Amino acid sequence: MNTLRIPITRIGDEGCYFEEHVRVTSIQPSDAKAVAVETATIAGNFERLGAEFLFRGHITGVYEGACVRCLEAAQAPFDVDVAWVFAEGPAAVFEEIGHALETGSDDLADNAHDTDAPRTFQGHDINLAPYVWEEVVFAQPSRFLCHEECAGLCPRCGTNRNYGACKCVNEDNEEPVGNHGLAALADMFPELAPKKTKE
Ligand SMILES: [Zn+2]
Ligand SMILES: [Zn+2]
């Protein structure tokens, strides 16, 4: 059962509060790539606007992935504000977005996402699932960091530097890239150094 489906009869003149916690796989279209988040919570208020409906609220959850520096588990919480107007109409937008994401066409996805045009519902229920899915996909981080200061892995021995220094550290300090390294080279090969004033 789709718990993100709300009967419009539930939205009275005073509006109504809506809150649901869903498994993201339960709202994932069958042809869409999975997103790295297990559950999402949606909470907000529905209001009636004549024949249309306004939902204002937010979607929260936590993406999980591997830190780009140290490869350990990393989390990225999200909290997206949404304001959606729903009007009765054909279910076209979601199909287009699903297609755009599959084919990697950013233009169509961006256009569909940014539009202020009303979302649609059919019959007597508003189905939030496609729109929640859309937000969860768009809010995905492009990369994960376990924390801002992650020291990463040693490129030589692979030691996770967040847990302590490896034996390569001293060697690294002696060969930094830049002027100091060039000075060290000059010491090792004095004949290559710029000629000083002749004695
Ligand atoms: Zn890390
Ligand atoms: Zn090392």
Image (cartoon, helix red, strand yellow):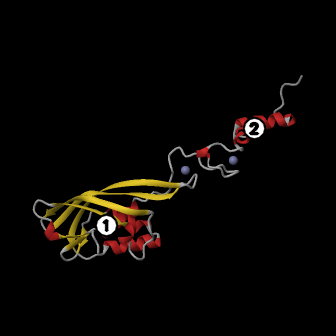
x%, y% of residue 30? 40, 76
Residue occupying the point 12% across, 65% down: 50
Give the quarter of the image for residue 112: bottom left
Q: Residue furthest left?
A: 13
Examine the rendered structure and indicate whether residue 9 appears above or below residue 189: below
Residue occupying the point 68% across, 45% down: 166
Residue assigned mark 1: 131
Residue assigned mark 2: 182
Q: Residue furthest right?
A: 199
x%, y% of residue 109? 39, 67
**Amino acid carrying mark 2 in the image:** Leu
Give the quarter of the image for residue 196: top right
- Which of 59 and 109 lies nearest the eye of the viewer? 59
- Between the residue at mark 2 and the residue at mark 1, the CA separation in whole angstroms equals 57 Å
Residue 48 is labelled as none
* Residue 112 shows in the view: no
On the rendered image, what quadrant is the C terminus found in?
top right
